[in-house]
Amino acid sequence: MKIWIATGGTGGHVFPALAVANELAARGHKITVSCDGRVKKMVADGAPHGARRVHIWASGVGGKGRAHQIIALFKIGVSSIALVLRFMFSRPNRVVAFGGYASVPAVFAAHVWGIPTYLHEQNGAIGRANRFAMRWVKTLMTSFQNVNGIPKNSSARVVYTGLPVRREFMERAGAPLPGKMHLLVTGGSLGAQILDTVVPIAVRDMKNKKIFITHQTRPENVAKLQKFYADNKIHANVLSFIRDMATAISDADLVIGRGGAGTVIELTTIGRPAILVPLAINPDQAANAANFEKLGGGFAIAQDKFTPKWLTATLTELFENPSRLEKMAKKSLVKNNAVEMIADTVLK
């Protein structure tokens, strides 16, 4: 069977696409992977051996001014026409799209030629590109059991599959909590500044200073946070980048972070309690965090309510009751067989 995998934009779209592409190739199917210029190298490094790679002329549409949006839509339109012509002569049996505007041309071309098309939504709220593409899709595959924003007039079948994660996270699934009062803070971006502001003060105000913190932050904040923790006799390791995030999460008794889909699924794959503070302007993160909270694995708290006082009380209560952390860890654990489920869904 000839299967076309459409992806692009960011690594969050590309990695799941490549994981599924490799699984389908291992099952003996011929794979073509299309992507935009931003992720060409990533696709070249991770695509299955022997897979064809196709460059799509596309870029994001939202948030950069009217002129940029017009140019971006023009690129998508040109690429859509190009793929319609390409599919005329070399028609795939399936098209599997992993979101982002770079997926839209392949979905449209598949619709023109009546090719079964599958779309994966990684977040708990459907994105703009996927919402636009839904009109041409027969099956929507989701990372979460509850997804907001699916068009009410959509006739697409919705299948919960989960989101693929890297093998190192799978290998640590269900690992017991270390029980060493180890807190992991995953910041690092401009949107995570509030974590750098609130967490150190909250920990400083805790009576029990046996806590150990691994704190990921932006490079320019490393020295400042190191000094703050040292001055307040708090054991901490402050880093600008965590290379082995699977080990970092596995070694933690509690995680504080944002609500990105990748972060949430990594937590549920290993099984770790967490306090999630979704980016205030990002409805996707809020939906992802809400899904995590429903599991019973932790807290989804709005940014304006994430104060040092609240966090001090919460951390104190959790670390003084390790049995509660263990229960939260068990509730957060979700078996991740997303790669196999997506492949099985596509091949049915």
Image (cartoon, rainbow, N blue to C red):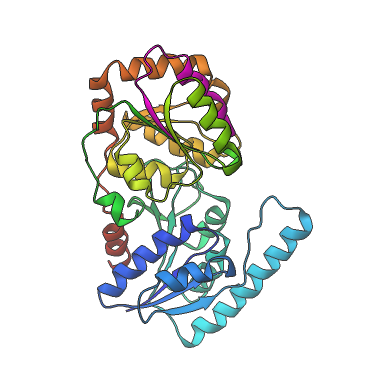
Residue 100 lies left or right of residue 317; in this view the side is: right
**Horizontal and vertical percent for residue 59?**
63, 63
Count numbered badges in the picture: 0
Image point (44%, 21%), residue name: 233
Query: Image quarter for residue 338?
Result: bottom left
Residue bounds of the magenta highlight = 193-214
Q: Quadrant of the N terminus?
A: bottom left
Image point (56%, 83%), residue name: 85
Based on the picture, tell me whether residue 208 belongs to the magenta stretch: yes
**Horizontal and vertical percent for residue 47?**
40, 72
Does residue 11 appear in this view?
Answer: yes
Residue 178 lies left or right of residue 183; in this view the side is: left
Say which of 231 and 215 sits in front: 231
Say which of 186 and 115 sits in front: 186
Residue 142 lies left or right of residue 176; in this view the side is: right
Image point (42%, 31%), residue name: 236
Using the image, determine if residue 312 lies above or below residue 34: above
